[in-house]
Image (cartoon, rainbow, N blue to C red):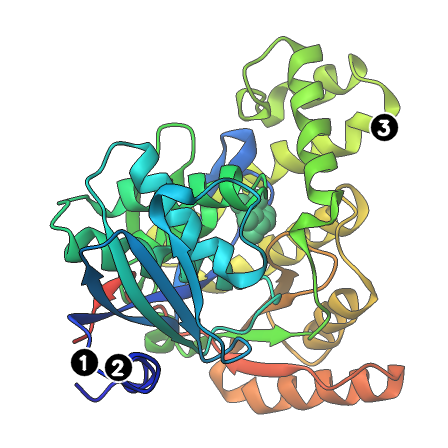
Amino acid sequence: MTTDAADAFAAAYGDAPDGVWAAPGRINVIGEHTDYNEGFVLPAALPHTTRVAARRRADGRIRLISAQGDGKVTELALDGLAPGAVPGWAAYPAGVFWALAQAGHPVGGADLAFTSDVPTGAGLSSSAALECATAIALDELYGLGLDAPTRALLAQRAENDFVGVPCGALDQMASSCCVAGHAFFLDTRTLTGRQVPLDLPAVGLSLLVIDTRVKHDLGDGAYAALRAGCERAAELLGVRALRDIGVAELAAAEEKLPAELRPLLRHVVTEDQRVLDTVRLLDAGEPRALGPVLTAGHASLRDDYRVSCPETDLAVSAANAAGALGARMMGGGFGGSVLALVDTGRLAAVEQAVRAAFAAAGFGAPLVFPAVPSPGAHRIA
Ligand code: GLA
């Protein structure tokens, strides 16, 4: 086996793994902060993956090492796992063992070695890639026969209940279920979806990721506070989730809410509509028309949801000023990455304009790369 994860495995454990699996990070074309409101999302998988080389163990022990970590092996006992007890990055894979065991799946111990090129803290779902790689590896090592959405929901459970981050299902569903060349139109209420062809290069367009390198941290409480605000708004409006309010009912619904909850409602309701509009435009073969929808999504995240920051705002405005068709921040916010829709012929000009704007503002250099819709979690060796 000639994968970097297999090499890391051999270096750590002195032997060959039983197999190697990969799970990707993701972009989200549109549909931000809608997943925990039971709304719509439209992610696509990145070519950047977390790989895991893994081998079963018969003694219920777990050993974990990451090339991105401190070079030390973390050793745990499967039957000793408890929420909150595992610090740092190892909590994500340990949480997947725990979630599988909690759900009654006959999972045992394993040795795992991880490598990854998914940028961390960049709003590109490096945590979900770590969880979903672990989930598919354990599924296949132990012959559990789980399908991709089931693995995604177990990974989400690991993050919610073991790591303690109250995220929705967007990231794990994307990392597990995406298909190359497509975006995944997902209804997070029913967890049913449809793969929407996304072959932008064929029409001379590209999606550009601009990672501002400003680190966000979903665990810092802001995300949980926003989620709680949405749940409170739904309760006051007498609906199960904000997903149940349509744009036609928005004005009347706003009247029923205290001032501080109105912008949250406005964002969620209009964002769900933007996902539907985007899918309609893609189905109609009008991808250029996506640009203004993306930029409107950014304005809503900046002005109503208030999760943008100076760096993401600048990346959006500089990209658009340099000829991008539209741009928006992605992920939880407070940093992270921007997605821009760009004529392929203008990619270099847009990248250069963003770099120049960042330098002029005294911001650190961003990481810029094109997003090519790639496969979800799969076995590689
Ligand atoms: C983070 C969370 C997701 C989702 C996004 C915002 O990425 O993990 O569940 O809520 O923020 O759309």
Which residue type carries mark 3?
A: Glu
Q: Is residue 368 left or right of residue 108?
A: right
Residue labelled with disc 2: 6
Q: Which residue is painted at 37% across and 40% down in the image?
A: 99
Q: Nearer the viewer, residue 255 or 45?
A: 45
**The image quarter in which residue 356 lies:** bottom right
Labels 3, 2: front one: 2
Q: Earlier in the sequence, mark 3 or mark 2?
A: 2
Could you say which disc has been placed on residue 16 in the image?
1
Labels 1, 3: front one: 1
Q: Nearer the viewer, residue 345 or 127?
A: 127
Which residue type carries mark 1?
A: Ala
Residue labelled with disc 3: 260
- Distance (Cα) linking label 3 and label 2: 51 Å
- Distance (Cα) linking label 1 and label 3: 56 Å
Q: Position of residue 229 (x, y in %)?
A: 73, 28
Q: Position of residue 92 (x, y in %)?
A: 47, 55
Depicted 69 relative to depicted 96: above or below: below
Depicted 223 relative to depicted 374: above or below: above
Q: Count of labels shown? A: 3
> Mark 1 and 3 residues: CB-CB less than 8 Å, in contact?
no
Q: Which residue is painted at 31% across and 56% down in the image?
A: 61
Q: Which residue is painted at 66% across and 51% down in the image?
A: 218
Q: Earlier in the sequence, mark 1 or mark 2?
A: 2
Q: Quadrant of the N terminus?
A: bottom left
Q: Nearer the viewer, residue 356 or 124?
A: 124
User: Around disc 1, counting alpha carbons within 10 Å, would you say few (fewer than 14), some (14 to 19), or many (20 or more)?
Assistant: some
- Distance (Cα) linking label 1 and label 2: 7 Å
Q: Is residue 127 left or right of residue 322?
A: left
Depicted 224 relative to depicted 377: above or below: above
